[in-house]
Image (cartoon, rainbow, N blue to C red):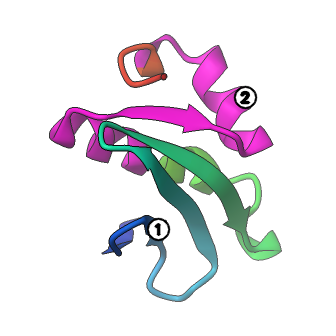
Amino acid sequence: MEFIHDKQEKRGRFHSADGKAEIVYSWFREDAIIIEHTEVDQSLEGQGVGKKLVNAVAGFARETGIKIRPSCVFAKAVMERGESYKDVLY
């Protein structure tokens, strides 16, 4: 599944074209964002879509040299369990 990245000055989100999955973030420093919310439609549950959204944000963080503070319970659990996110955790 591919995601669309909508960026605004202080906020942003990655979402599916059909609107069934999204992850929302906001900037809290010039070099760091907070993941606020992750939502996946019930029809997509169990397919790893939430983790793919977290991966999309992590990829964005790596490309831009920023860090992530996950306040969303789901994103926090995914990122704290996975060694592959250590480089982008704030």
* Quarter occupied by residue 24: bottom right
User: Is residue 49 left or right of 57 when viewed as pictured?
Assistant: right
| Circle 2: residue type | Ala
Main SS, magenta residues = helix
Q: Report the Cα–Cα distance between label 1 and label 2.
A: 19 Å
> Which residue is depicted at the point 70% across and 40% down?
71
Could you say where residue 11 lies in the image, as x and y percent from the top left?
45, 67
Could you say where residue 61 lies in the image, as x and y percent from the top left?
31, 39
For this rendering, which residue is in front, 52 or 54? 54
> Which residue is depicted at the point 82% across and 71% down?
42
Asked if residue 54 is positioned above or below residue 24 in the image, the reply reads above
* Neighbourhood count class around disc 1 (C-alpha, 10 Å): few under 14, some 14–19, many 20 upward: many
| Circle 1: residue type | Arg
Q: Which residue is mark 2?
A: 77
User: Is residue 24 left or right of 29 when viewed as pictured?
Assistant: right
Could you say where residue 90 lies in the image, as x and y percent from the top left?
48, 22
Q: Quadrant of the N terminus?
A: bottom left
Asked if residue 22 is positioned above or below residue 77 in the image, the reply reads below
User: Is residue 39 left or right of 48 when viewed as pictured?
Assistant: right
User: Is residue 89 left or right of 74 when viewed as pictured?
Assistant: left
State the extent of the magenta-drawn residues as a range: 56-84
Asked if residue 32 is positioned above or below residue 39 in the image, the reply reads above
